[in-house]
Image (spheres, helix red, strand yellow):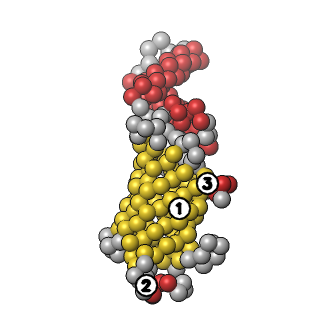
């Protein structure tokens, strides 16, 4: 999300960006001719003006993407504001000694800008969020609007188990990677979905609510 890209920009917005670059290029060319009194620019000068115009527009978009979270801009890109902190419970297919599915409490932190988002989080053995069992960080994140108005959150993750946690050896909480697919409801800001991974051949469900609702 820190690198500028145009993957979230629909074709209409891309056309507007192109028009802005053309307008900035025309303005820069006019100033160049006015102050340097060139009737005809050389190829090098024309290329310099074009590159400068492109750099100005992209720099402005980069600043907006990094520091601005205007809801109307997100709506323009058909995206939801998922930025925030969430808590909830994860139920794994992995079973404990009583043949019951393992349940862990979790906290998710979603950092979003117009360029994308990043998901990090922690899993705990207790509802007091003191006995941490593992942490994770996302990669290759995608946010897609569904037909019912909700949004699908999809990302790969890398999970790091806490070596000192008593559950590490008990349930083989080794480091692993996997995929998470969840759905964000913009009305109540809840997130529900599932995950699965290859190294531990396990899967499970995740249900989250905004922390201010807990």
Residue 98 marker: 2
Are the residues at dot 3 and dot 2 in contact (C-beta closer than 8 Å)?
no
| Image spot of residue 128 (x, y percent) | 65, 73
Q: Quick check: can you spot residue 174?
A: no
Are the residues at dot 3 and dot 1 in contact (C-beta closer than 8 Å)?
no
Badge 2 crowding class, 10 Å Cα cut-off, few under 14, some 14 to 19, many 20 or more, is: few
Which residue does the numbered mark 1 point to in the structure image? 120
| Image spot of residue 45 (x, y percent) | 45, 25
Q: Secondary structure at mark 2?
A: loop
| Image spot of residue 145 (x, y percent) | 43, 40
Q: Which is closer to the viewer, label 3 or label 2?
A: 2
Q: Earlier in the sequence, mark 3 or mark 1?
A: 1
| Image spot of residue 104 (x, y percent) | 52, 72
Looking at the image, is 36 positioned above or below residue 137? above
Q: CA distance from mark 3 to mark 2?
A: 32 Å
Q: Secondary structure at mark 1?
A: strand
Which residue does the numbered mark 3 point to in the structure image? 210
* Residue at image coords 41%, 40%: 146
Q: CA distance from mark 2 to mark 1?
A: 30 Å
Q: Secondary structure at mark 3?
A: strand
Q: Earlier in the sequence, mark 3 or mark 2?
A: 2
The foreground one among 34 and 122 is: 122
The foreground one among 97 and 53 is: 97
* Residue at image coords 55%, 33%: 73
């Amino acid at each position: 999300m820190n690198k500028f890209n145009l993957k979230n920009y629909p074709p209409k917005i891309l056309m507007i960006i192109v028009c802005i670059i053309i307008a900035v290029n025309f303005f820069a060319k006019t100033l160049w001719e006015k102050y340097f009194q060139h009737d005809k620019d050389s190829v090098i000068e024309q290329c310099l003006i074009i590159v400068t115009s492109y750099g100005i527009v992209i720099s402005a978009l980069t600043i907006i993407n990094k520091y601005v979270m205007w809801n109307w801009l997100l709506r323009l890109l058909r995206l939801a504001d998922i930025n925030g902190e969430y808590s909830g419970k994860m139920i794994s297919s992995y079973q404990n000694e009583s043949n019951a599915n393992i349940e862990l409490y979790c906290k998710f932190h979603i950092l979003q800008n117009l360029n994308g988002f990043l998901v990090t989080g922690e899993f705990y053995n207790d509802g007091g969020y003191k006995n941490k069992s593992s942490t994770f960080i996302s990669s290759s994140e995608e946010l897609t609007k569904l037909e019912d108005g909700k949004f699908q959150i999809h990302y790969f993750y890398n999970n790091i188990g806490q070596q000192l946690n008593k559950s590490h050896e008990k349930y083989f909480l080794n480091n692993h990677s996997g995929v998470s697919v969840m759905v964000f409801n913009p009305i109540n800001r809840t997130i529900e979905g599932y995950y699965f991974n290859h190294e531990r051949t396990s899967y499970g469900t995740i249900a989250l609510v905004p922390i201010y609702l807990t």
